[in-house]
Amino acid sequence: MIKAIVFDWAGTTIDYGSQAPIIAFQQAFESFGITVPTAEIRADLGLDKLDHVKKIMAKPDVQDKWREKHPNDSISQAVDQIYRRFQTEIVQVLAKTSQLKSGLVELVAYCQQRGIKYASTTGYTSEMLGHVIPLAAKQGYTPEINVTSDLTNGIGRPNPDMLLYAMDKMGVEGPHSVIKVGDTVNDILEGKAAHAITVGVVEGGNLIGLTEDEYNSLSIAKQNSLKNRAITILENAGADYVIDNLQDLINLISAIDTDQKYEPQPAPILLTPGPLTTSPVVKKQMLVDHGTWDDEYKADTQAVRQALLKLANVSSANYTAVLMQGSGTFAVESTIGTAVPKQSAVLMIAINGAYGQRMAQIADYLDIKHVDLNFREDEITDWHQIKRALDAHPEVTHFAIVHCETTTGILNPIETIIPKVHAKGITTIVDAMSSFGGVPIDVEKSEIDYLISSSNKCIQGVPGFGLVIARKAVIDETAGNARSLALDLYDQYKCFEDNDGKWRFTSPTHVVYAFLQALRELDAEGGVSGRNARYTQNEKMLRAGMIEIGYQPVIDEAVQSPIITSFKYPTADFDFRSLYEYLKQNGFIIYPGKVSNIDSFRIGNIGEVYSGDIEELLTLIKKHDVVKV
Ligand SMILES: *Cc1c(COP(=O)(O)O)cnc(C)c1O
């Protein structure tokens, strides 16, 4: 198990492209009339800064230059003077270059959640670092210990002393549970010397050595060639793993902790909820075949059902979780077709999008009497109108509503509506397909009788089954209601209950194992609230970034869910196909629109997607728009 991470600073956690030391070195040498090319400085970055000055001053051409300009001062005096000058320059530069790299804040939250400690070592002196620490803290990054070579008798990288010092102070033993992360060869050597797990980061690191704007303006082919060159250098230095960015470290830790081979997330990233992007470890669970009669498999199915009750905030005395083969719609059809009796029952459906519409269509197919209550697609369903409709239709026995209408991404206020509907003695059905697991829902407190979701939305599994959280007292009364053999929710429920987790008919075994892993990852992220925080951050970043590029969201921010965001076509002749194909070529899949009266397209924020991905996506969209003009 990973117990601690020791990070480098510039180029790794702050200062994209590791600009600060380069600028400060160049200015320091320049002030003595000596020009040192950037590449020469970059070659030894990560060293202790005094050692670094010495190393540059050891070059014959630099010494010649010095003697020519300063005939009275020795080389060792040169080292002293230039180093002192560097120290004053760096302070000025640091103030401008200490922005955290993307993915760090999420990574740190992940570490805190899992009790993984984190510290830093650096080639900076304690004085320089003293300027950086408060700037990083202000942005949400505070390592437990920050070690400079001042604490290790001046012994810096590539020696292991600083890293061992950090481990000692954190109280972690056994370097195999410690990851050293850095962007330079000296970082890797330091980690190897301490027998830690060494991880090189390439994006925004010294080996690429470009500012974020410079890097983003390159073609993808050029970026890949720079990345491959950096990967080779770090691997040749002995790095155990090389990752693109800090976000990949979460997958890496999860792979190490579960004893699996680390696989970087393969392209494409799906921004289509869902199916959505699952973690490499989730995907991997499907490589083993399982028998369905097996006791272990049945126990695992029971564990899934139990975990779902916990996610729904319901007691197992009052609620049950029923799994149903098929996509989400199969579970909706199964629920409506089983919950509503054949005689003297009427279903009211609150509709503000395609999924509400689909429930009406299901009712038509099943010959269920229904009253449709239509709202505008860009407005939430409103209790007062629902109340008026219920008053006008006292014959209504069942009520259905969508929580997050994935058509637009609007979030309907079920917490206020459902208890009031339920108080009238009406059975309540909520399609929370795209929100369950990503938006906290108190199913029991909200008086929801049936809540429906599926394996491939916010719980981040693969497609294959739907799930229904049902109030026992209600589902117990539904024997014989079903209009379909395969979709009989009651029979499915009874089969699970009477046979210790045995599925009726062939079950999606591979999907169930992927789902179990997805549940573990949801737990590791801090449960629904942790996941909600990440999705919310993705959504806010996407919305703000798209508005900046010139796209307008379809719905108001106040009613926007963190799940998916829809955008209007910016112009009448906007070519969605062209944007879609361009993003697909570059590793992202987005979603066409579904709003009936507005030309729009959608981008999902859920799945194994982090702010770094959103940032990359926004850069691509900007690039596409520029290319087009
Ligand atoms: C995804 C989704 C469904 C189910 O769609 P399937 O394609 O059948 O999986 C139902 N309702 C909502 C709100 C959804 O987002």
Image (spheres, rainbow, N blue to C red):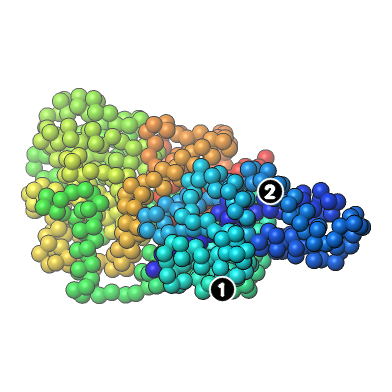
Q: Secondary structure at mark 1?
A: helix
Residues marked 1 and 2 touching at CB (< 8 Å): no
**Left or right of 91: which side holds 480?**
left
Location of the N terminus by quadrant is bottom left
Count the marks: 2
Residue 111's place in the image compared with 406, above or below, is below
> What residue did someone put label 1 on?
193
What's the amino acid at mark 2?
Ile
Please provide percent x and percent y for residue 528.
32, 49
Query: 10 Å neighbourhood of mark 1: few (<14), some, or many (≥20)?
Result: some
Of the numbered discs 1 and 2, the one sitting upstream in the chain is: 2
Residue 439's place in the image compared with 152, above or below, is above
**Residue 97 in view here:** yes
Q: Determine which of the numbered discs, if any, sits on residue 46 in the image.
A: none
Kindly tell me whether mark 2's CB lies below 8 Å from ligand 1. Answer: no
Q: Secondary structure at mark 2?
A: helix
Please provide percent x and percent y for residue 416.
23, 33
> Could you say which is closer to the camera, residue 205 or residue 290?
205
Q: Determine which of the numbered discs, if any, sits on residue 90 in the image.
A: 2
Q: Residue at x 17, y 29 (%)?
A: 390
Q: Which quadrant of the structure image shows residue 348?
A: top left
Query: 10 Å neighbourhood of mark 2: few (<14), some, or many (≥20)?
Result: many
Q: Which quadrant of the structure image shows residue 308?
A: bottom left
> Could you say which is closer to the camera, residue 33 or residue 294?
33
> Could you say which is closer to the camera, residue 30 or residue 244?
30
> Could you say which is closer to the camera, residue 293 or residue 306?
306
Q: Residue at x 51, y 42 (%)?
A: 138
Location of the C terminus by quadrant is top right
Q: Residue at x 20, y 53 (%)?
A: 309
**Residue 220 in view here:** no
What's the amino acid at mark 1?
Ala
Residue 345's place in the image compared with 387, above or below, is below
